[in-house]
Image (cartoon, grey):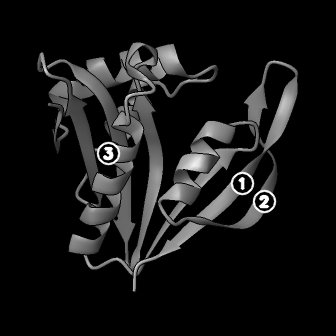
């Protein structure tokens, strides 16, 4: 049975490996390091062999929680790990007294959009030409989840 625990700086290599294998334009190691200050709440998912198989990066500022990144190793996708991580993020945001959760997602990432909608997120806007692609740029869909 998978478990979720708080991420530590020592987890960054495993998180970076997942990020690089799951994304066409992955975050850098330096970006991961900047997300370990007091306003961030990050977690990793460990599979039944205690191998880090997924993660998320969350931030709380004032009354808003933002999901900056979430990823599951491509070899472990389709097992519900993404939903477990997202539900953990939402629960952590509630424990931190956030009133809303926010995220943005590539317009082409229909699987993620379905997951976010399944967990109650609604589309609130679009950031045109936000994400880089091999052929140029694509829009980001902004989504929110009211917690109150």
Q: Position of residue 96 (x, y in %)?
A: 24, 72
Q: Are marks 3 and 1 in contact (CB under 8 Å)?
A: no
Q: Residue at x 56, y 68 (%)?
A: 144
Which badge, 2 or 1, is on the more N-terminal residue?
2
Choose between 143 and 113: the one closer to the eye: 113
According to the picture, the residue beneath numbered tag 1 turns out to be 141
According to the picture, the residue beneath numbered tag 2 turns out to be 126
Q: Nearer the viewer, mark 3 or mark 1?
A: 3
* Disc 3 from disc 1: Cα separation: 22 Å
- Name of the residue lying farthest toward the right: 135
According to the picture, the residue beneath numbered tag 3 turns out to be 84
* Image-quadrant location for residue 136: top right
The residue carrying pointer 2 sits among few (fewer than 14), some (14 to 19) or many (20 or more) residues within 10 Å by Cα, namely: some
* Disc 2 from disc 1: Cα separation: 5 Å
Q: Nearer the viewer, mark 3 or mark 2?
A: 3
Considering the image in quadrants, where does the C terminus appear? bottom left
- Name of the residue lying farthest toward the bottom: 148
């Amino acid at each position: 049975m998978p478990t979720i625990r708080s991420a530590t700086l020592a987890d960054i290599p495993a998180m970076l490996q997942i990020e690089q294998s799951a994304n066409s334009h992955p975050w850098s190691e330096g970006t991961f390091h900047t997300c370990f200050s007091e306003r961030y709440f990050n977690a990793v998912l460990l599979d039944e062999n205690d191998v880090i198989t997924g993660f998320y990066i969350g931030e709380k500022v004032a009354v808003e929680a933002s999901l900056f990144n979430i990823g599951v190793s491509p070899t472990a996708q389709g097992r519900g790990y993404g939903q477990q991580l997202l539900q953990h993020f939402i629960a952590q945001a509630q424990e931190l007294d956030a009133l809303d959760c926010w995220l943005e997602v590539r317009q082409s990432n229909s699987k993620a959009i379905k997951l976010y909608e399944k967990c109650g997120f609604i589309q609130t806007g679009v950031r045109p030409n936000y994400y880089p692609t091999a052929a140029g740029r694509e829009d980001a869909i902004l989504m929110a989840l009211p917690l109150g």
